[in-house]
């Protein structure tokens, strides 16, 4: 069994390297729709991929990945919204873990919106 | 439609956090001799009124403004009852809500439990201010994950810092494997 002793060791190590967390208003917020509609259409792997990428690349001071409710566009789930301070919201639709990785690299790190996956590029009827 | 029981659990637990719960307890218990899989979620959120509780299994009832249907609980209820199991939900305003689903373990219509570790990981990551107590039982064996204990040790160190997130992932993986011996559920 994995024990809490290991967690104590992690704490000891981390306390020596005091990390500064970016101010909340300066961070880009990444919201994944996690209501029944989102979950049923595959939001969990999308959210886990994004939070893994942000954590593994030590980007938690720049990005926060969190969940949101249903925004009434159930047919387009899984939906990911990117809210960058000072910029217009970008809504990505019908996401997968693979598309999420592309958005992480191109948009979040590279600054270029992946137009093909956005709600505004969808043919809304 | 959900494809895994663990997704139903994620869905119901999300409701608990939306109800403002400070502690959400999730029990998953496999009993092979009784041929049962029991899932119980209890929270100390705002609870439901008697009227809401009466309608909660009705797919055309929801408190949301964004759409007119509420399928989460009906899905979960149907998934359990279609395996010869049972479903119940108790709630009191200001006290909290308890949802229990019992599945026929070997029933042909029981969907797989699925990736429980991923569900718990998602909940912890997305709700840093909510505590989760996860109890996983496989016959006589069991393990618990209690974020209150993690919090006590970590103090100000956040759960989403890479080392801590990796620890939580390994904690779930190793302890689940040791509890059920890698059984496919």
Image (cartoon, rainbow, N blue to C red):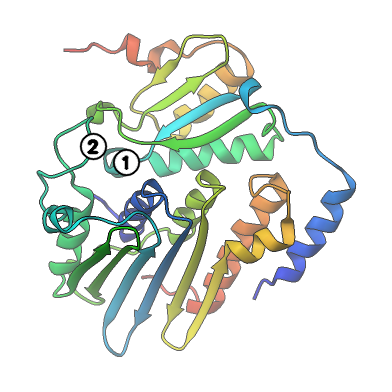
Q: Is the same chain shared between marks 1 and 2? A: no
Q: Which residue occupies 73% across, 54% down?
A: B155
Residue at 24% x, 77% y is: B106
Q: Position of residue A19 (x, y in %)?
A: 81, 38
Q: Numbered disc 2: what chain?
A: B
Residue beneath disc 2: B64
Image position, residue A109 (x, y; %): 63, 19
Foreground label between 1 and 2: 2
Contact between marks 1 and 2 (CB within 8 A): the answer is yes
Image x and y of residue A63, in percent: 61, 28
Q: Chain of mark 1?
A: A
**Picture residue at 69% right of the left edge, 52% below the top:** B164
Q: CA distance from mark 1 to mark 2?
A: 10 Å
Q: Secondary structure at mark 2?
A: loop
Mark 1 Cα shell of 10 Å, populated few (<14), some (14-19), many (≥20): many
Q: Which residue is mark 1?
A: A35
Report the front residue among A97 and B91.
B91
């Amino acid at each position: 069994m994995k024990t809490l002793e290991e967690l104590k060791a992690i704490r000891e190590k981390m306390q020596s390297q005091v990390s500064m967390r970016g101010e909340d208003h300066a961070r880009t917020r990444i919201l994944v729709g996690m209501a029944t509609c989102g979950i049923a259409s595959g939001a969990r792997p999308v959210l886990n991929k994004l939070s893994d990428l942000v954590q593994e690349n030590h980007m938690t001071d720049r990005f926060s990945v969190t969940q949101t409710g249903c925004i009434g566009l159930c047919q387009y789930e899984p939906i990911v919204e990117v809210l960058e301070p000072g910029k217009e919201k970008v809504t990505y639709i019908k996401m997968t873990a693979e598309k999420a990785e592309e958005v992480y690299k191109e948009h979040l790190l590279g600054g270029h919106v992946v137009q093909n996956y956005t709600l505004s590029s969808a043919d809304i009827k | 439609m959900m494809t895994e029981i663990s997704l139903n659990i994620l869905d119901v637990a999300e409701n608990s956090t939306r109800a403002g719960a400070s502690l959400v307890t999730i029990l998953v218990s496999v009993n092979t001799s009784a041929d049962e899989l029991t899932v119980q979620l209890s929270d100390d959120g705002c609870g439901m009124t008697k009227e809401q509780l009466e309608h909660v299994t009705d797919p055309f009832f929801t408190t949301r403004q964004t759409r007119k249907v509420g399928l989460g609980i009906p899905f979960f209820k149907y998934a359990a009852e279609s395996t010869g199991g049972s479903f119940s939900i108790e709630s009191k305003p200001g006290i909290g809500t308890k949802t229990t689903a019992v599945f026929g373990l070997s029933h042909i219509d029981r969907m797989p439990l699925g990736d429980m570790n991923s569900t718990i990981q998602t909940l912890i990551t997305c709700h840093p201010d909510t505590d989760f107590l996860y109890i996983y039982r496989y016959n006589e064996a069991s393990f618990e994950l209690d974020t209150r204990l993690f919090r006590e040790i970590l103090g100000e160190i956040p759960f989403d810092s890479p080392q801590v997130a990796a620890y939580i992932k390994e904690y779930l993986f190793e302890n689940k494997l040791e509890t059920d011996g890698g059984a496919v559920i």
